[in-house]
Image: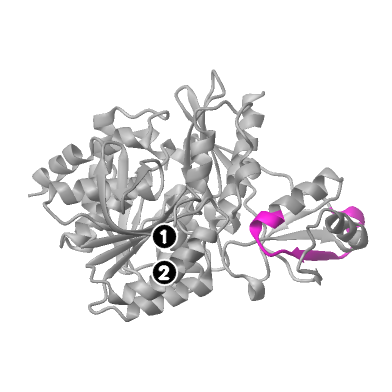
Amino acid sequence: MLAVVGTVPDPSIPVLDGQATIEGDEIVVGGKRLRVGRGTTALLAAAIKVAILMDQPMPHAYLAGDIGTGEGSLRLYAYLTEKLPHGKFRAIAFHYILPDVDWHNKVLLALDAMEPRPLLLADAGWMYVAKMSGQAPSYDLFTPDAGELAFLADEKAPHPFYTRGFLLKEENRVPELIERAYRNEDASRCILVKGTRDFVATRHGIHATIDGPTVEAMEAIGGTGDTLSGMAAALVASGKDLLHAAQIAAEANRVAGVLTRATPATQIHEIIGNLPRALGEVLGSSR
Amino acid sequence: MRFWRKGKETKQKAPQHEGGMGKGILVFRSTTEVIRAERLLRAKGKEVRVMGPPPEIQTGCDMVIEYPLMSQLEILRILREAKLEPLEAVPVDSPLLAPVGLFHVKELGGYIMVRAANMKITVEKSTGMIVNVSGGGCPDVPYLAQELVGKTLKDAPQPLELGHTLCGYALQLAYEEAMRICSQ
């Protein structure tokens, strides 16, 4: 089973701990209804769509409301340190959170107590704090975009906001930045770099590149990275090999953009509706 | 890669410090306080800027305010009066990490997408309508997207009015650049 950890933009939401389902454009966890928008709700929606398609259990969600003050994030970190050692998950996807190095490291200790230890995927704020704490190699999959890859490759930057300009210059340096991130021990076991061309890589080099179909508007649409991470996480939880799961998710996300006829003004819930068909097409062609 | 070939880069000017004297940093409890203090001090004409904290005090999503030491007394007075006193005000002699100063602008048909660091804002050129906010990873990003998308640049709240994190700050920079481009 997959677990998803992240924050949602409503400060009135306490810590939610339960199975996540989807009803229309809403995620339901513990009786609370959360409108699907960019962020962790988009990741969860994509993961649920994959679980339904592949006849897998619904993901388990650990969520807290936070609009950036960090209060919800701190509640969630503390909750996880108590609850995770008793959880049984094949994979955990960590997502939006206010980075806090000390609390991150406490959660990592709690994960070490899990038996068996789940596969760990991180994106967004959790990927930032994993890198800034020096613990990136403890994770199995990061899903950065080109700007976030430059941050991973910059051994001095504690947050993408401080990435040095010479690393941000050109997107066609992705293979070089991947190599640099691994050399500094600032990357996970496998990495999926999303962009005009997607790269699936490990410390041994580029495993796959995905450059079609191309939907240029996808970069502008908030949440397309979240759906990509959500699909990859759900595929890993279903038993797919990590590298293969990353590649399938990248392809399916692109196909969903085509099916939606996405423009820069498209909203993420429109794309989520097309994920099952897109994933079905990609899985069908890869069999 | 296409994004960079087609895109245009612009560079933010670094502020010049008063008198070329030594510099200090103001350390606050939270990024929210840093953002409020910076806005207040700039409104009072003080030449301050947000910078990355020295490695020994980095805890996560944080920043400090760099200021000219010769203005220390006045700056602390302004902050005290606003009940925004910093935890510390200390001199620094080693270079601090600077926020991203490069913007990348990409034309997408009738839209422009402006990126600052990890944050992107996309605006319809003919109306100035914010149609999407993408990138980022701190918890205020989905909240900011919720509050900004569907409003024009002119009518939308500025990201720093609602944001609390470095991602929120980066979105403010992208917003300002989009505003500058659209007003040309």
Report the front residue among B45 and A42. Answer: A42
Horizontally, residue A44 falls left or right of residue A248, namely right
Nearer to me, A128 or A10:
A10
Q: Residue at x 85, y 59 (%)?
A: B80
Question: Residue at coordinates 14% horizontally, 55% vertically from top-left?
Answer: A56
Report if residue B27 lies within the magenta region.
yes
Chain-order first, disc 2 or disc 1: 1
Please give left or right for residue B10 compared with residue A33 in the image: right
Q: Disc number at residue A15? A: 1
Q: Please tell me whether residue B79 belongs to the stretch shown in magenta.
A: no
Residue pointed to by mark 2: A79
Q: Amino acid at mark 1?
A: Val
Q: Which residues are magenta?
A: B17-34
Instruction: Give coordinates of residue A271: x percent, y percent.
Output: 30, 35
Q: Are marks 2 and 1 in contact (CB under 8 Å)?
A: yes
Asked which secondary structure carries label 2, the reply is helix
